[in-house]
């Protein structure tokens, strides 16, 4: 079975995905890294040199390519992946195990404040406005995220507890 991890930026999709993959002994794929490898550019470089629309088109293409593979794996998506085109429908068709790592905006703001400069969509947001920005962004994105098969409220879990969940 393919396991898909989704959630907002900074929700630990990659860290958790790697840990579960290790535990279950199945391969782990990070969609952002897969895109960066395929394009020979970092995600930041793709955004700055080619723009978000180009990134979103490629994101869907690489997602489709991965979902068509025969083998099982655990895949962590980018924060926006489920929310563009018909990506969420593709995900639901290809697997029965998608998991939304759900955090409150306050926790996400705390987790993202230092990493902000490296995130194309957050780098321009002032520290003081970050939580509000995330709250609004999540309001738009939650209808997609909430289509996952499982939703885990992560705010109060330790890393070990979240792996067990
Ligand atoms: C994005 C999240 C990023 C990356 C890109 C866009 C988003 O992935 O795909 O910067 O739209 O939320 P992470 O969630 O792994 O940071």
Image (cartoon, rainbow, N blue to C red):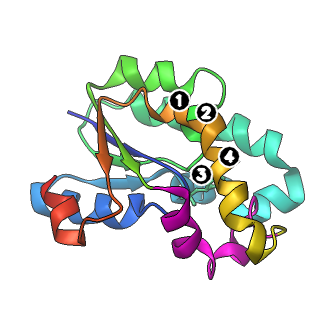
Reply above or below: 126 against 41: below
Asked if the beta carbon under badge 3 is closer than 8 A to the nearest atom of ligand 1, the reply is yes
Residue 18 % position (x, y): 29, 64
Q: How many labels does the image show?
A: 4
| Residue depicted at x 47% and y 48% | 7
On whether ligand 1 comes within 8 Å of the CB at mark 2, the answer is: yes
Count residues near mark 4 (Cα–Cα under 10 Å), then give few for <14, some for 14-19, many for 20+: few
User: How far is the residue under mark 1 from the one under mark 4?
Assistant: 12 Å
Quote the CA–CA distance across marks 3 and 2: 17 Å
CA neighbours of label 3 inside 10 A, class few (<14), some (14 to 19), many (20+) = many
The answer to whether the residues at label 2 and label 1 have Cβ atoms under 8 Å apart is yes
Residue topped by disc 4: 137
Question: Which residue is drawn at the image coordinates 70% and 58% (left, top)?
Answer: 132
- Estimate the spatial distance between the alpha carbons at disc 4 and disc 3, rounded to whole Å: 23 Å
Regarding mark 4 in the picture, which secondary structure is present there? helix
How far is the residue under mark 1 from the one under mark 3?
Answer: 21 Å
Residue under label 1, please give it: 144
Q: Image quarter for residue 162? A: bottom left
Q: Work out how far the residue at label 2 is from the one at label 4, CA to CA, in angstroms.
A: 11 Å
Which of marks 3 and 1 precedes in the sequence? 3
Which residue is identified by label 2? 83
Q: Which of 68 and 96 is in front in this view?
A: 96
| Mark nearer the viewer, 3 or 2 | 2
Residue indicated by mark 3: 35
Q: Tell me where the magenta segment starts and ends, as one range.
A: 104-123
């Amino acid at each position: 079975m393919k396991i898909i991890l989704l959630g907002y930026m900074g929700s630990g999709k990659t860290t958790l995905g790697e840990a579960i993959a290790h535990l279950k002994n199945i391969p782990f794929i990070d969609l952002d890294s897969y895109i960066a490898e395929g394009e020979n550019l970092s995600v930041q470089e793709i955004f700055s040199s080619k723009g978000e629309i180009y990134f979103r088109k490629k994101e869907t293409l690489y997602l489709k390519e991965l979902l068509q593979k025969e083998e099982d794996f655990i895949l962590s998506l980018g924060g926006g992946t489920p929310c563009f085109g018909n990506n969420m429908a593709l995900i639901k068709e290809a697997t029965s195990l998608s998991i939304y790592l759900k955090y409150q905006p306050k926790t996400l703001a705390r987790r993202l404040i230092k990493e902000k400069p490296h995130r194309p969509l957050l780098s321009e947001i002032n520290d003081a406005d970050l939580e509000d920005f995330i709250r609004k962004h999540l309001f738009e994105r939650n209808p997609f995220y909430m289509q996952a098969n499982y939703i885990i409220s992560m705010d109060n879990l330790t890393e070990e507890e979240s792996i067990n969940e």
